[in-house]
Image (cartoon, grey):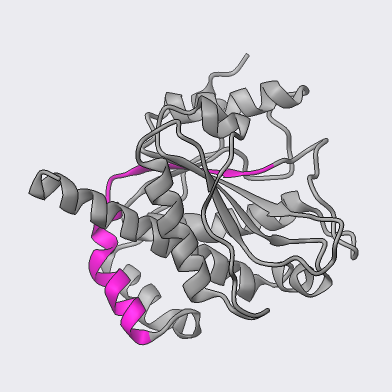
Amino acid sequence: MASFRNRWPRTVRGLSVFLLLALLLGLFYNLSTLPLRKEIAVLASRVGQRIIVLDPGHGGFDGGARGLSGVEEEEIVLEVARYLARYLEGAGARVFLTRDEDEELAEDKVEDLDARIRLAEEVAADLFLSIHANSFPSPYEYGAQTFYCHNHSASEALAKEIQGALVEGIDVLGYNYREAQFAEYYILRKLPIPAVLIEVGFLSNPREEALLSQGAYQKRLAWCIFVGVVRHFSRTDLGEETGK
């Protein structure tokens, strides 16, 4: 059996600091307000040298939730993870994807989840972000939501930063009233590092499904998650520096 180092997808190549500033302040002008982009450009160095595992949920035999148009969760979340990887690598982080194509990691669901957890342990990750898309019997539910478990003292704070950025940055369907929420998901319980699970929206909502299928909206979601991660590390570093 191949080693994880060979089995798992390679890291995404990084960008220079100058390209990062261009990315944040110019190329994606419509993704945020100018003050926010300036704030994140200043704080983005806090992400430098961090090891972050991005986990696009499902894949292979398990496509996850399915929208009315036939689009599957595993397709949407992989694209969001790829965009997020670019932002994080641009800020200097080392990023590992649990999968970089439509494939399962094991034939059994629990073994598949355990394989994702092992990757985080193998690479000594500082952070684990699992990306999913939601579904509900009612077609009216909408909005991204971030979940955490009490596996690590920093998981709740991380979830609140990411959720705050999602609420702040995405209001296409109206105000997102959802808050970061505790949930004992298997993959979160088993990880010994700060970890959250992000549901980027509801595929059961036709309007949100249409948005989730668009590259521009996927970039916006990735940007908001990136903002939350940057803010989390900036506050964590400040606490360490001041002894709090």
The answer, for residue 87, to whether it is visible in the render is: no
Where is 212 relative to 148, above or below? below
Identity of the residue drawn at 58% across and 63% down = 178
Task: Kindly indicate the quadrant of the structure image that contains residue 67.
Answer: bottom right
Determine if the magenta segment contains residue 162: no
Where is the N terminus found, in terms of image quarters? top right
Tell me residue 113's x, y (percent).
64, 28
Tell me residue 154's x, y (percent).
35, 41
Q: Is residue 240 left or right of residue 124?
A: left
Residue that lies at the very extreme toward the top in this rendered image:
1
Please state which of residues 204 and 22 is positioned toward the viewer in this rendering.
204
Q: Is residue 136 left or right of residue 95?
A: right
Please state which of residues 179 and 94 is positioned toward the viewer in this rendering.
179
Identity of the residue drawn at 45% across and 34% down = 150
Q: Which residues are magenta?
A: 34-57
Q: Is residue 101 left or right of residue 184?
A: right
The answer, for residue 118, to whether it is visible in the render is: yes
Residue that lies at the very extreme toward the left in this rendered image:
242
* Numbered circles on residues, count: 0
Tell me residue 167's x, y (percent).
52, 70
Identity of the residue drawn at 34% across and 68% down = 20
Identity of the residue drawn at 59% across and 77% down = 175
Tell me residue 179's x, y (percent).
53, 59
Where is 31 relative to 91, above or below? below
Where is the C terminus found, in terms of image quarters? top left
Determine if the magenta segment contains residue 48: yes
Please state which of residues 73 and 231 is positioned toward the viewer in this rendering.
231
